């Protein structure tokens, strides 16, 4: 009995120690980036910055946040999310609903499912996509950032699997009461799928927020860059014509490492603020498509 009791205490201790080490391993790079962003460039060059800022300074954040171009790009990203998120979710919901039905109720279901799955394996390519966007006269417009990815097949597959897990008796009862497919979808399926929808909303917002490559290829004017594209150009192609007289003093205390760390923090804060409100749904929705026990 004593041996069993000792073993029961040993496992939680070992388990907690291993998990604690893994947690520190994940947090250490983030703390290092945080320290570099708030440290003076001289300390960063010396290599004395580890997990805590040295010669604390906000110069890197000042350099990034005081740019008028930063707030313009921030507005473009907000506009992209405001248009893209409702469009993505609407198309995902109305596409997943019929595909969640049995083949007897919707005969072309199998064809459409395999057709969409095929697009996940084989894409049209970057050049044909660019030519299509150009032919549709969407270059340098917000629609070039929204429409090419308006229908996400991965999200559709997740949601249709979640719809298929819902009891059929709910939709059958709605049909008996005279409800059509449209009413059944929005009054029964959508309200009972909030966990799945909240998870997809989180995925969609993060995808729009982090996307930068489409801004590079579809936007010819830097004024139309989304936030992530702009933050990339701050380091790779800095434009010094916008610098003020006082900015040259700021440049002496920053470098590409400090500003790059600052932009990582700035780009992460909005998502970190949104995540806690969706966490309770995210925990439930992360098992989309799992088999019920």
Image (cartoon, rainbow, N blue to C red):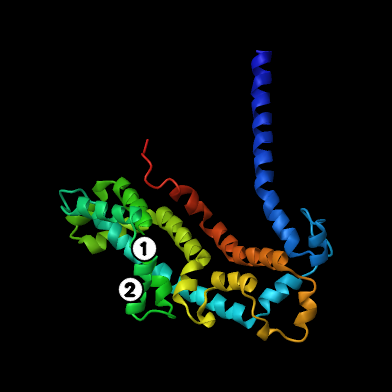
Numbered label tally: 2
Asked if residue 46 lies left or right of residue 120, the reply is: right
| Residue under the point 65% across and 63% down | 265
Against 209, is 175 above or below?
Answer: above
Asked if residue 286 lies left or right of residue 3, the reply is: left
Q: Position of residue 257 (x, y in %)?
A: 71, 64
Residues under labels 2 and 1: Cα distance?
11 Å
Q: Is residue 109 visible?
A: yes
State the residue position of label 1. 125
Against 116, is 139 above or below?
Answer: below
Which residue reaches farthest top? 1
Tell me the number on the disc at residue 144. none
Quadrant, the N terminus: top right
> Which of the two residues, 198 or 222, is positioned nearer the viewer here?
222
Against 221, is 208 above or below?
Answer: above
Q: Position of residue 127 (x, y in %)?
A: 38, 68
Quadrant, the C terminus: top left
Q: Residues within 10 Å of mark 2 (few under 14, many from 20)?
A: few
- Chain-order first, disc 2 or disc 1: 1
Q: Position of residue 258 (x, y in %)?
A: 72, 65
Instruction: Tell me where residue 254 sits by quadrant.
Output: bottom right
State the residue position of label 2. 132
């Amino acid at each position: 009995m004593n041996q069993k009791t000792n073993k029961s205490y040993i496992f939680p201790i070992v388990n907690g120690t291993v998990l604690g080490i893994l947690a520190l391993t994940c947090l250490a790079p983030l703390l290092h980036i945080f320290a570099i962003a708030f440290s003076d460039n001289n300390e960063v060059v010396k290599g004395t910055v580890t997990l805590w800022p040295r010669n604390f300074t906000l110069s890197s954040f000042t350099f990034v946040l005081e740019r008028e171009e930063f707030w313009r790009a921030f507005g473009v990203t907000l506009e992209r999310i405001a248009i893209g998120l409702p469009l993505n979710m609407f198309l995902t919901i109305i596409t997943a609903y019929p595909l969640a039905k049995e083949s007897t109720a919707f005969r072309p279901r199998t064809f459409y499912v395999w057709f969409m799955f095929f697009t996940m394996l084989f894409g049209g390519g970057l050049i044909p996509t660019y030519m299509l966007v150009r032919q549709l006269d969407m270059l340098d417009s917000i629609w070039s950032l929204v429409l090419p990815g308006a229908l996400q097949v991965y999200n559709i597959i997740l949601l249709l699997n979640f719809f298929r897990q819902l009891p059929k008796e709910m939709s059958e009862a709605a049909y008996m009461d005279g409800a059509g497919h449209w009413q059944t979808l929005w009054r029964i399926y959508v309200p009972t799928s909030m966990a799945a929808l909240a998870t997809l909303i989180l995925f969609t917002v993060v995808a729009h927020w982090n996307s930068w490559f489409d801004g590079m290829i579809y936007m010819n004017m830097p004024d139309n860059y989304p936030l992530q594209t702009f933050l990339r150009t701050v380091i790779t192609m800095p434009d010094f014509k916008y610098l003020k007289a006082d900015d040259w003093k700021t440049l002496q205390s920053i470098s590409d490492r400090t500003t790059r760390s600052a932009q990582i923090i700035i780009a992460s804060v909005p998502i970190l603020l949104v995540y806690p409100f969706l966490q309770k749904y995210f925990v439930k929705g992360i098992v989309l498509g799992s088999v019920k026990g």
